[in-house]
Image (spheres, grey):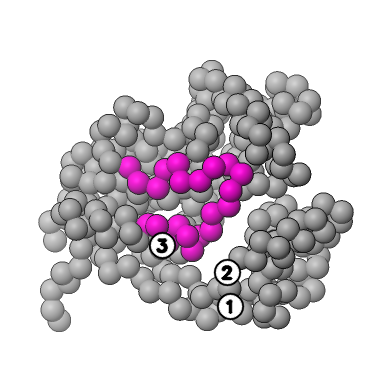
Amino acid sequence: MGVDTRPLAIALMGPTASGKTATALELAERLGGEIISVDSALLYRGLDIGAAKPDAAERARAPHHLLDLRDPWESYSAAEFANDARRALDDIVARGRMPILAGGTGLYFRALLEGLSPMPEADPQLRAEISAEAERAGWPAMHAQLTQVDPKAAARIHATDPQRIQRALEVFRLTGKPISAWQAAHGAQRPPLRVLKLVLSPADRAVLHLRIELRFDQMVAQGFLDEVRRLRALPELMAAPAPLDLPAIRAVGYRQAWQYLDGEGGAAEFRDRAIFATRQLAKRQLTWLRGELDARWFDPASERARLLDAVAAFVDH
């Protein structure tokens, strides 16, 4: 068997608040790397404090890619991410640098590393019609409708996930073919890289929960609510018929802050709901990560040396 000469890349995955940013920066500095964000919140302009976006000092330590790509009233698909990330990967490799993919959005990792099935392009008019229908009937009713036409997709998509319900119904109405059938027909090409998959996750779930609480309190202290007030004041968001259905505003923490500023509950209830939502996100992320059978898991607090050894062995092999 010949030597594998494909360029190397590191995929640094993990649940929210597990320490991916700090580890990605350390690896980038050690390896001459550049960081590609694999995060569905960091791509939005104005989502900074609540999304734990790398600040100016962190960005100065290593080049970052795929941050601030869209305004918060715009959409962005996994297919768009895969295309943008492939271009960034090609550029980084061409410069002789090490790509470090860091984030917690499993769908984006899958789209890039495993490929997506070919899909019909979005139809803005049909999408608007589905949104209007959902405003009248509610997203649970739309999910029930999806169950009738595509039970496989409906079983995967939660009734409180408007973006994915909308896309699944859109694809079916456009083509007469369920989105699950499109997804079964694998078509996209994987990037020509040799990838080391690393998962950062505290061995003790209570430690992760504490990190989530501490980070949320820190975000509030840094001005998270003022950040959301600035978003609410944007003319495009003020004009949005259902801002809470926008992907950016559905990001964990932002939805709860928006509702709090709408007068739903007090400060303590806002904190509880935001922390609960973040824990639920971490739980979903861990469920997905357990399906990544070729990934190696590390506790960021106690296994830093073992992680660095694994990276060194991969790079030197």
- In this view of the protein, can residue 207 be seen by the observer? no
- Give the numbered dot on residue 47: none
Residue 182 lies within the magenta run: no
Nearer mark to the viewer, of 2 and 3: 2
Mark 1, residue position:
182
Q: Residue 124: which quarter of the image? A: bottom right
* Quarter placement of the N terminus: bottom left
Measured from the top left, where is residue 146 in percent x and y? Answer: 76, 68
Q: Which residues are magenta?
A: 64-85
| Residue drawn 74% across the image and 44% down it | 242
Counting from the top left corner in percent of width and height, residue 83 is at 41, 62
Residue type at numbered disc 1? Trp
How far is disc 1 from disc 3 in space, using C-alphas? 19 Å
Horizontal side of 8 relative to 272 (left or right) equals left
Of pointers 2 and 3, the one earlier in the residue sequence: 3
Which mark's residue is nearer the viewer, 2 or 1?
2
Q: Residue furthest right?
A: 136
Q: Secondary structure at mark 1?
A: helix
- Quadrant (top left, top right, bottom left, bottom right) of the C terminus: bottom left
Asked if residue 67 lies in the magenta stretch, the reply is yes
Query: What is the number of callouts on the image?
Result: 3
Residue 121 circle label = 2
Residue that label 3 marks: 83
295 versus 233 height, above or below:
below
Does 170 sit left or right of 70 as displayed? right
Q: Earlier in the sequence, mark 1 or mark 3?
A: 3
Q: Residue at x 18, y 41 (%)?
A: 30
Q: CA distance from mark 2 to mark 3?
A: 14 Å
33 or 302: nearer the eye?
Answer: 33
- The type of residue carrying mark 3 is Asn
User: Is residue 6 depicted above or below 250 in this figure?
Assistant: below
